[in-house]
Image (tube, rainbow, N blue to C red):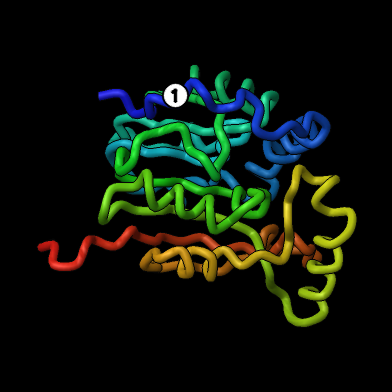
């Protein structure tokens, strides 16, 4: 059964375009796999997943090698052209079938309730409309389906929060592909109607100076089953 909606061909090929940031991100993200322990975080993020999975904002595809073989298919949505090409290269090396496609988080080019799980990894910081993006996550996820998330956001006390908000109002988003530092991913998921499962707040990197990007959360949420559904 095809997973894309009939209107998928109408999606703009490049919903966002950040070529300089894409080059920078591709380099630092690869270095972070070992230097900051991101490889281990990706293992924990994806462990135990199965069935059909959609990954939103796949970037350069560093999650792909960490998907367990119990996953039957990954549809990876990435709006930025250069990162999408790197994700395609990563998909070719992956043991799990991965289909990389253009698209925006606020208008996913796939059918409703087509996936067993959604993965959002360092993406809610940069989407233009978080409530709309999470409404799309809910739409494409089957009832009872699982959201795995790893995001950075607000944290570190009043002084750091002030700094994060000040950067969000000035230079940070235009220099970093639309990224925002002071968003609250846990609250956003709750407000979007997801049931929160276990989640863990953590610092990245775990040692060294605390940066505005250091305050992260790793966890699980679910799309609730309809009322009266037996589980």
Along the horizontal axis of the image, is 196 left or right of 70? right
- x, y percentage for residue 205? 70, 58
Q: Residue at image x 64%, y 59%?
A: 152
In the rendered view of the protein, which quadrant contains the C terminus? bottom left
Name the residue carrying label 1: 99
Residue 216 in the figure: left or right of residue 161: left
In the image, residue 111 sits, relative to residue 117, either above or below, namely above
Residue 186 placement (x, y as % from top left)? 52, 67
**Residue shown at 41%/60% (left/top)?**
220
Going by the image, does 3 lie left or right of 22? left
Left or right: 154 as drawn, with respect to 148: right
Quarter of the image for residue 216 reads bottom right
Dot 1: within a 10 Å radius of its alpha carbon, few (fewer than 14), some, or many (20 or more) residues?
Answer: some
Q: Which quadrant holds residue 50? A: top left
Q: Residue at x 40, y 66 (%)?
A: 193
Give the camera-side residue of 189 and 31.
189
Image position, residue 43 (x, y; %): 46, 46
User: Residue at 46% across / 61% down in the picture?
Assistant: 219
Judged from this view, the residue extending furthest toward the bottom is: 158
Q: Could you say which quadrant of the image residue 89 lies in? A: top right
């Amino acid at each position: 059964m095809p997973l894309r909606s009939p209107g998928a061909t109408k999606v703009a090929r490049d919903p966002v375009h950040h070529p300089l940031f894409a080059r920078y991100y591709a380099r630092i993200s690869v270095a972070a796999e070992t230097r900051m322990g991101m490889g281990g975080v990706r293992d924990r993020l994806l462990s135990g997943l199965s069935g059909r999975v959609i990954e939103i904002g796949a970037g350069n595809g560093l999650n792909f090698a960490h998907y367990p073989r119990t996953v039957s298919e990954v549809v990876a949505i990435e709006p930025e052209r250069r990162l999408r090409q790197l994700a395609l290269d990563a998909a070719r090396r992956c043991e799990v079938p991965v289909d990389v496609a253009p698209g925006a988080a606020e208008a996913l080019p796939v059918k409703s309730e087509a996936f067993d799980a959604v993965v959002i990894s360092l993406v809610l910081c940069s989407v233009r409309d978080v409530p709309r993006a999470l409404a799309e996550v809910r739409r494409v996820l089957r009832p009872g389906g699982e959201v795995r998330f790893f995001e950075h956001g607000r944290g570190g006390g009043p002084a750091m929060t002030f700094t994060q908000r000040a950067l969000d109002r000035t230079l940070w988003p235009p220099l970093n592909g639309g990224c925002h530092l002071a968003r609250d991913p846990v609250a956003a998921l709750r407000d979007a109607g997801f049931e929160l499962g276990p989640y863990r707040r953590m610092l990245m990197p775990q040692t060294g100076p605390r940066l505005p990007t250091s305050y992260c959360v790793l966890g699980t949420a679910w799309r609730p089953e309809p009322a009266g559904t037996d589980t």
